[in-house]
Image (cartoon, rainbow, N blue to C red):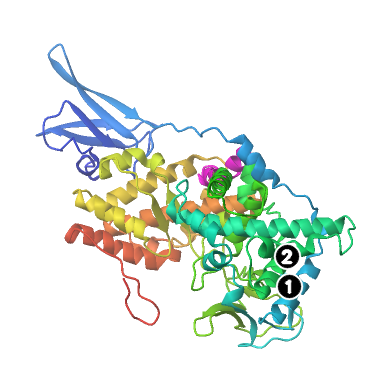
Amino acid sequence: LRSQPLFDGQNRAPSQPAGNDQDKVQLLVPANVRPGFTKLQVTVGPGDQVQLAVPETARPGDLIELERQDAAGKASWMCKFVRDTFLNGEDRKSSLAVMADLGRRLSPSSLDVDASVARLFDIARASGCYVSPKIKRGMAPPLNVPGLIAVDAISNGEELIRVPERLHITPPAVEKCAPALFAAVRDMSGLPENRRTEALHGFFLAALLTDAEDRAFARSQGSSAQETPETQSVLKDVWPAEPDQKKVWEAYADTLLSEDFAYHPFRLAAFNPDGMRGSLSPSQEAEYYIDMATDLVSMHGALARCVEAAGVKSKSQEVEMFLRARLCAQTRVFQTCVDTTLVPVADLLNHSPTLEPGVLWNWDEKARAMVITAVKDHAPGEELFTTYGSRSNMLLYRTYGFTHTPETEPGWTYIVRPHLVRPVMTVFLDDERPQILLESSHIDETLCKVLNQVAARGKDGAEFLRLLCARSRWAYEQDERVKPALDALQRARQEDPASHAWWSYIGEEHRDLANQDSFRVVMSEYLCLTAHMEAADVADGRKDESTCLRGCKTMRGSLVDALRMLKTVGGFSLHRVPPDGETKK
């Protein structure tokens, strides 16, 4: 017991200074306890200490209340362990039903997507784009999902696609076509300012999709060319666009009609909220998916009211089409000179499952164009892969609806839910509730800010981080479905302390866990929490770095330095250093 540090100094509630006589003391269950085994030694006054056992049901970060009771002239202490219980709010069933259905009038089998893409290529070329004749839409191993494949040999350095800025769908382009709509959404009060661009983009694209569905539906009913609504277009009758824009954007919308997003977690969560919660338990990501499904329905309602109140001329659209448009934008958006950019043709490329892309995109500032260039040779029939960024499985799944295999995942992510660590926030941050993003590749700005706030209050940043992660990680360690993977992780680390290869040591009866998107998310979060706990232990000298997870050495080195700076100089700041060595704030 005496070899353990006294925790009451740093874990005490702000109104409970250590060392003074107290009738009531509040502190937290430390991060490294073993419930049912560990005993804590708590200072309750000068030379006066109380020893208490941590019960089996306690978890790190639970609140401990010690209260002095005098009976028959004899002082004693009553100990209480307080645990928060959280219940999920009622699902908004009507909103979730809308997301689950998406109001499809056309079956995928009635849409010839290959023909639509080929038509888009032809129209794009005629409108000033370059689309190499060596590429086409198709499928190839290992993904076997629609993407772009080579029809002839492609050489390293060969330009494959060039799309000028005037054909991109961006908020400035929308403003030019539909200035009244842009102004109404910009000034709307029912939506946070930082989400108005997202709403505008989705509303505009939904109108294009509505037109495209009307055209396809009329053709599927056998209408003649004169009877189809080809000549009726929102880009001509409501929001006039340039002739080339109109042709390319309409052809682009035709290619998007087949997207039903049946694989996307927002739709899966809307269709079966309880099933999604079960597949992701103990992760809280399912709640995010459910919240987003209902949020997008609410966003459409706010937009519709805003447009109607402003008297803006617009294309009538159903909420289902807006949801499809938002998911199209979320899974296809680029960052060019504008953060939110849809680039026809260029967004047909799939993400490399091996993190070794064969083509890369680049914004050509001088030419004001998006350019796709091969960075390796391709044989005929080979798929062209790009990269969607070095994202963890948690971020990949919530954005695109797929994950990497565990062995190719480039990093891990965990988002701290303040309500799940409320006692820790109360003690270290005076009850503030900041959102904190943990990344195994680097220190995020949110973590930097919070650690500096903790230090400014005279608290220990390493102990705060350790408790935050231990309390968040506890639910994973108690989950029966996760235990086989955690046991496998322990076996992997017994052989190689720096290994995280849980999938290589898991039993045959549980091997399918490594193939499940939802379980990959769970393990990504667990490993991220573990990596940050280990960094806190290294900073305090409790752990040797050679025994830490090797996949996050850069983050750990930075975080160890930061935590030590908090103790020596009281704070730290982050500076981003790009590859060329030029330091930027």
The mark total stands at: 2
Which of the 4 quarters of the picture holds residue 173?
bottom right
Q: Residue furthest left?
A: 46
Query: Relative to residue 295, is residue 58 depicted above or below?
Result: above
- Residues under labels 1 and 2: Cα distance? 8 Å
Residue 528 appears in the figure: yes
Residue 27 rendering spot, x and y as whole percentages: 26, 36
Front residue (pair 429, 484):
429
Q: In terms of secondary structure, what is the magenta stretch mainly?
A: helix
Q: Is residue 9 left or right of residue 297?
A: left
Among numbered discs 1 and 2, the one appearing first in the sequence: 1
Query: Could you say which disc has been placed on residue 120 in the image?
Result: 1
Residue 106 rendering spot, x and y as whole percentages: 79, 53
Residue 169 rendering spot, x and y as whole percentages: 59, 67
Front residue (pair 387, 57):
387
| Residue under numbered circle 2 | 255
Cβ atoms under marks 1 and 2 closer than 8 Å: yes
Q: Is residue 411 left or right of residue 383?
A: left
Residue under the point 60% across and 49% down: 266
Query: Which structural element holds mark 2?
Result: helix
Q: Residues within 10 Å of mark 1 (few under 14, many from 20)?
A: many
Magenta span of residues: 272-292
Query: Which structural element holds mark 1?
Result: helix
* Residue type at numbered disc 2: Thr
Front residue (pair 460, 111):
111
Residue under the point 59% across and 71% down: 168
Q: Is residue 305 left or right of residue 188?
A: right
* Residue type at numbered disc 1: Leu
Q: Is residue 577 magenta?
A: no
The N terminus, quarter of image: top left
